[in-house]
């Protein structure tokens, strides 16, 4: 088993991803938003790119009921949060690959370390298909901005002209 740890120190929204296999979590966790994120102070909601949402306030109707592998999730807070999030489980087996669809989507970084965009993540044939990658927290972007490295445990907004295959090793 392995522990995924990330320090949450933000206000507003962050995109989050993990390399822990949601089908192989420690016995103290379930692959649900309430189990994984419900104890985070100041959390309003968790949503995926498809628009499904989990509200921490149980009086609101939630449509996000499970957390799945290789997906970035947006966590929204009502004010600044300082929290250490830990998820314990078995890491996804590597190499792990998936396809990023054409258009805008969220890119999860399911690696144990940060990765350079041009050297570590995409091959030379796929790089021209990527029109932009944006860090929601800092506003930095690639290719013409300052964003060059994607941090483990974070999610990014990605725009592509065609579908792109990504492999984490």
Image: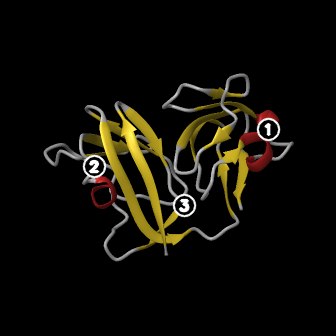
Q: Residue furthest left?
A: 59
Q: What secondary structure is found at the residue carrying circle 2?
A: loop
Query: How far is disc 2 from disc 1 in space, using C-alphas?
Result: 36 Å
Residue at image mark 2: 40
Tell me which numbered mark, 3 or 1, is placed earlier along the sequence: 3
Q: What secondary structure is found at the residue carrying circle 3?
A: loop
Tell me which numbered mark, 2 or 3, is placed earlier along the sequence: 3
For the point 30% across and 39% down, the residue is 81
Total labels: the figure holds: 3
Is residue 169 toward the left or the right of residue 155 in the image? right
Residue 46 in the image: state x and y as whole percent.
Answer: 35, 45
Residue at image mark 3: 19
For the point 61% across and 57% down, the residue is 111
Tell me which numbered mark, 2 or 1, is placed earlier along the sequence: 2
For the point 73% across and 27% down, the residue is 143
Residue at image mark 1: 127
Query: Which of label 2 and label 1 is nearer to you?
Result: 2
Is residue 78 toward the left or the right of residue 112 in the image? left
For the point 54% across and 60% down, the residue is 19
Q: What is the quadrant of residue 88 in the picture?
A: bottom left
Query: How far is disc 3 from disc 1 in space, using C-alphas?
Result: 23 Å
Q: Residue furthest right?
A: 124
Neighbour tally class for label 1: few under 14, some 14-19, many 20 plus, Cα within 10 Å: some
């Amino acid at each position: 088993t392995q522990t995924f740890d990330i320090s949450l120190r933000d206000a507003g929204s962050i995109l989050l991803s993990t390399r822990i296999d949601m089908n192989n979590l420690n016995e103290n966790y379930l692959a649900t938003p309430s189990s994984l994120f419900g104890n985070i102070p100041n959390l309003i909601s968790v949503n995926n790119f498809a628009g499904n949402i989990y509200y921490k306030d149980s009086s609101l109707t939630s449509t996000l009921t499970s957390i799945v592998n290789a997906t970035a999730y947006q966590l929204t807070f009502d004010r600044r949060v300082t929290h250490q999030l830990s998820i314990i489980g078995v890491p996804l087996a590597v190499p792990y690959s998936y396809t990023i669809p054409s258009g805008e989507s969220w890119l999860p970084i399911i690696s144990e370390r940060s990765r350079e965009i041009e050297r570590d993540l995409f091959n030379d044939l796929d790089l021209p298909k990527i029109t932009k990658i944006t860090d929601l927290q800092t506003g930095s972007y690639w290719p013409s901005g300052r964003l060059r490295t994607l941090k483990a445990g974070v999610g990014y907004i990605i725009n592509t002209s065609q579908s792109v295959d990504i492999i984490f090793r």
